[in-house]
Amino acid sequence: MDEEFVVIREYRTPWEAHVAAARLEDEGIPCTVEDEDAATAFGSAIGGIAVSLKVPESCREKAEELLEDIEEQAAEGEDEDDEQ
Protein backbone atom coordinates (compact mmCIF):
# COMPACT_ATOMS: atom_id res chain seq x y z
CA MET A 1 0.00 0.00 0.00
CA ASP A 2 1.25 3.49 -0.84
CA GLU A 3 2.08 5.83 1.99
CA GLU A 4 -0.30 8.71 2.62
CA PHE A 5 0.92 12.20 1.76
CA VAL A 6 0.06 14.95 4.26
CA VAL A 7 -0.07 18.73 3.89
CA ILE A 8 2.82 20.44 5.66
CA ARG A 9 2.50 23.95 4.25
CA GLU A 10 0.05 26.06 2.27
CA TYR A 11 1.24 28.92 0.09
CA ARG A 12 -0.46 31.80 -1.68
CA THR A 13 1.31 31.22 -4.98
CA PRO A 14 2.48 28.16 -6.90
CA TRP A 15 5.92 29.77 -7.18
CA GLU A 16 6.40 29.79 -3.40
CA ALA A 17 5.26 26.18 -3.14
CA HIS A 18 7.62 25.03 -5.90
CA VAL A 19 10.60 26.79 -4.33
CA ALA A 20 9.93 24.96 -1.06
CA ALA A 21 9.37 21.68 -2.92
CA ALA A 22 12.70 22.03 -4.71
CA ARG A 23 14.50 22.52 -1.40
CA LEU A 24 12.85 19.40 0.04
CA GLU A 25 13.67 17.37 -3.06
CA ASP A 26 17.30 18.53 -2.87
CA GLU A 27 17.39 16.90 0.59
CA GLY A 28 15.87 13.68 -0.75
CA ILE A 29 12.36 14.28 0.58
CA PRO A 30 9.66 13.35 -1.91
CA CYS A 31 6.89 15.89 -2.18
CA THR A 32 4.05 17.12 -4.32
CA VAL A 33 2.43 20.50 -4.98
CA GLU A 34 -1.35 20.47 -5.30
CA ASP A 35 -4.11 22.94 -6.15
CA GLU A 36 -1.80 25.19 -8.17
CA ASP A 37 -4.13 25.33 -11.18
CA ALA A 38 -7.08 26.46 -9.08
CA ALA A 39 -4.95 29.00 -7.23
CA THR A 40 -3.63 30.42 -10.49
CA ALA A 41 -7.03 30.55 -12.18
CA PHE A 42 -9.23 31.65 -9.29
CA GLY A 43 -7.00 32.70 -6.41
CA SER A 44 -7.30 36.46 -6.62
CA ALA A 45 -10.87 36.37 -7.87
CA ILE A 46 -12.28 34.62 -4.81
CA GLY A 47 -9.99 35.79 -2.06
CA GLY A 48 -7.25 33.21 -2.36
CA ILE A 49 -6.91 29.49 -2.79
CA ALA A 50 -3.99 27.88 -1.01
CA VAL A 51 -1.42 25.84 -2.89
CA SER A 52 -0.64 22.75 -0.81
CA LEU A 53 2.79 21.21 -0.29
CA LYS A 54 2.56 17.54 0.69
CA VAL A 55 5.10 14.96 1.85
CA PRO A 56 4.82 11.32 2.93
CA GLU A 57 3.80 10.99 6.58
CA SER A 58 7.13 9.30 7.37
CA CYS A 59 9.03 12.39 6.10
CA ARG A 60 6.84 14.96 7.82
CA GLU A 61 9.10 15.75 10.78
CA LYS A 62 12.29 16.08 8.72
CA ALA A 63 10.49 18.23 6.12
CA GLU A 64 9.02 20.51 8.82
CA GLU A 65 12.45 21.02 10.38
CA LEU A 66 14.05 21.79 7.04
CA LEU A 67 11.36 24.30 6.07
CA GLU A 68 11.61 25.99 9.48
CA ASP A 69 15.38 26.37 9.01
CA ILE A 70 14.84 27.83 5.53
CA GLU A 71 12.21 30.26 6.81
CA GLU A 72 14.51 31.38 9.65
CA GLN A 73 17.36 32.00 7.21
CA ALA A 74 15.05 34.01 4.95
CA ALA A 75 13.88 36.12 7.90
CA GLU A 76 17.48 36.77 8.94
CA GLY A 77 18.28 37.87 5.39
CA GLU A 78 15.36 40.29 5.44
CA ASP A 79 16.61 41.75 8.73
CA GLU A 80 20.07 42.31 7.22
CA ASP A 81 18.51 44.07 4.23
CA ASP A 82 16.57 46.39 6.56
CA GLU A 83 19.77 47.38 8.36
CA GLN A 84 21.49 48.53 5.18
Image (cartoon, grey):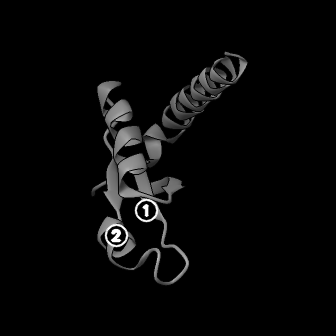
Q: Secondary structure at mark 1?
A: strand
Decide if residue 49 is on the left or right side of residue 22. Answer: right
Q: 14 or 83: which is nearer to us?
A: 83
The residue pinned by badge 1 equals: 51
Identify which amino acid the numbered label 1 is placed on.
Answer: Val
Decide if residue 72 is on the left or right side of residue 60. Answer: right
Q: Earlier in the sequence, mark 2 or mark 1?
A: 2
| Mark sitting on residue 8 | none
Residue at 37% in and 40% down: 19
Marks counted in the figure total 2
Q: 1 or 72: which is nearer to us?
A: 72
Expressed as whole percent of the image width and height from the top left, the position of residue 76 reads: 65, 21
Q: CA distance from mark 2 to mark 1?
A: 9 Å
> Quick one: label 1, few (<14), some, or many (20+) residues within 10 Å?
many
Expressed as whole percent of the image width and height from the top left, the position of residue 82 reads: 69, 24
Decide if residue 75 is on the left or right side of residue 37. Answer: right
Q: Residue pushed farthest bottom?
A: 46
The residue pinned by badge 2 equals: 40
Mark 2 or 1, closer to the camera: 2
Residue at 44% in and 38% down: 59
